[in-house]
Amino acid sequence: MGICRVDIHLPSDEEAFDTAVRIVKAADPIDYLVVALEQKDRRLIQVIMRDGPVQALLDNLQSLLEDRSGWRVTVADLDVTLPKLPEPKNEKKKASSQHTREELFVQVSSDANLNGYFIIMVILSTIVAAIGLVSDGVAAVIGAMVIAPLLGPILGFAMGAALGDLALLRRGILTLLAGVGIALGVSFVLALILPPNWESRELMSRAEVRLDGLALAMAAGGAAALSVTRGTSSALVGVMVAAALLPPGAAFGLFLGYGEWEFALRAALLLSLNIAALILSALIVFRLRKIRPRTWMEQQHATRAVWINAGLSAVFLLIAVALIVLLDLGQTVDIGN
């Protein structure tokens, strides 16, 4: 379980200071210290505490200070504290470790930005994926999955819905659409250069849409959201491979370039299915992990946004499942004839 330090910078307001100290004490900190400053008009409280109760502390401090000016609260993770701290006896405290809402917002929001780095990484990962698909190179396809940044805007979209933040929600979906559009354009151009290889299992498998792909995408989306909330970003590498967003997108563009419309539609269905499943599972995990706004009114807006987007994703998934079943039935009839 992580340890962090919370610095509370306050103006010289005795009422606010006394209330802030009571809030700190109620948060059950490991330790806290009122620091004497040279500036006579400033106060500083340094708090060391476990990650779990930090969110409640921040929410209470914001409720106290939001109508005042000249205050700031900073949070920093601590790698080491001496002497060594004993493990908490309360099992609930042990299991409650996760980043605060503010930390998650900064992390997810930065990954959902449409900037030069995002565009370059999409272009490079699409080139790697297209070459891997046409040459049947498994290693190249896996490498493209890892370096592709498309998972970031999906998590941004889900986080925006969970927090009722329309700006983040809109930025996430626009960045995702831009990334998919760039991938389609680059792969379409590459189809004019790279000759088709219909013997490539990597390419042709992206035209196969099955129900087990839905389960994989749901599990990957849940794992992505869970690893983000717990701060275990290293686990996202495996999630990126499991999510497999870029290969079907690159295959879609390649099939369009080759004039194979049926294969292109199947790859587009696989891509859309993965995106919808990732969004739905991320929304569910964020909801279960209680990632929500601070105030009651904002929570109502966020709940409405979550239900709307979850409902739309679920409806799309049901339509996709129906199409998959129809495609499977069509293939069975063709084989029987």
Image (cartoon, helix red, strand yellow):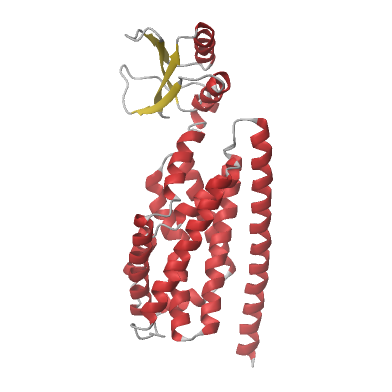
Residue sitting at x 45%, y 52%: 152
Residue 186 image offset from top left, x and y in percent: 39, 72
Counting the numbered discs, the total is 0
Horizontal placement of 239 versus 123: left or right?
right
Residue 204 image offset from top left, x and y in percent: 45, 79
Q: Is residue 99 visible?
A: no
Q: Is residue 279 above or below residue 160?
A: below
State the residue in front, 51 or 151: 151
Residue sitting at x 46%, y 45%: 109
Q: Quadrant of the C terminus?
A: bottom right
Q: Is residue 259 visible?
A: yes
Q: Quadrant of the N terminus?
A: top left
Q: Quadrant of residue 316?
A: bottom right
Residue 332 image offset from top left, x and y in percent: 63, 84
Residue sitting at x 67%, y 58%: 312
Q: Is residue 84 above or below residue 40?
A: below
* Residue located farthest toward the bottom when viewing the structure as drawn: 337
State the residue in front, 160 or 87: 160
Residue 138 image offset from top left, x and y in percent: 35, 70
Horizontal placement of 173 versus 251: left or right?
right
Residue sitting at x 41%, y 29%: 2
